[in-house]
Image (cartoon, grey):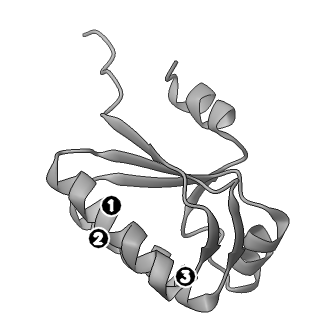
Amino acid sequence: MPPQPPPPLKILYPTHILDADQGKILYREIMDLLDTGIKLILIDCHNIGFVDSSGLGVLVRILKAVEQENARLVLCSLNDTFQMLLTMTHMEDVFEIYASQVHFRLVLGIS
């Protein structure tokens, strides 16, 4: 049996601050992607300068919604502050996190 191709991938690049307001926009964008059949969503966080507790809460809500659709949410390129927030809230094991898009693509075998 030949290997299965990876599911359709969409990469999102949120910028600046991930708070309640920006989180709502990101949530809606991801729900729209799920409606179109996207099953693998990578959020590249390299342009996010700050995440507050509301933004983290929205990410958890997004993760639950994605999982309910049998899809996959992945984060990459977190800055030190974002990584520390996940560690302090014990959420680093809840999210699938990669150091970079390159690392993510290597692990998944996506070119």
Is residue 76 positioned above or below 101 on the image? below
| Disc 3: which residue | 55
Q: Residue furthest right?
A: 80
Dot 1 lies on which element? helix
* Pick the front one: 101 or 64: 101
**Quadrant of the rendered image containing residue 81:** bottom right
- Residue 80 lies left or right of residue 22; in this view the side is right
| Disc 1: which residue | 30
- Residue 30 at x, y percent in the picture: 33, 60
* Pick the front one: 91 or 12: 12
Q: Disc 2 marks which amino acid?
A: Ala
Q: Residue at x 41, y 68 (%)?
A: 26
* Pick the front one: 89 or 29: 29
Tell me the number on the disc at residue 65.
2
The residues bearing labels 2 and 3 have C-alpha atoms spaced at a distance of 15 Å
The earlier-in-sequence mark between 2 and 1 is: 1
Q: Residue furthest top?
A: 2
Q: Disc 1 marks which amino acid?
A: Ile
Dot 3 lies on which element? helix
- Residue 67 lies left or right of residue 45; in this view the side is left
Evaluate if marks 2 and 1 touch, with contact meaning CB atoms under 8 Å apart: yes
- Residue 50 at x, y percent in the picture: 72, 75
**Quadrant of the rendered image containing residue 16:** bottom right
The residues bearing labels 2 and 1 have C-alpha atoms spaced at a distance of 9 Å
The earlier-in-sequence mark between 3 and 1 is: 1
Crowdedness near tag 3: few (<14), some (14–19) or many (≥20) residues, C-alpha within 10 Å: many
**Quadrant of the rendered image containing residue 39:** top left
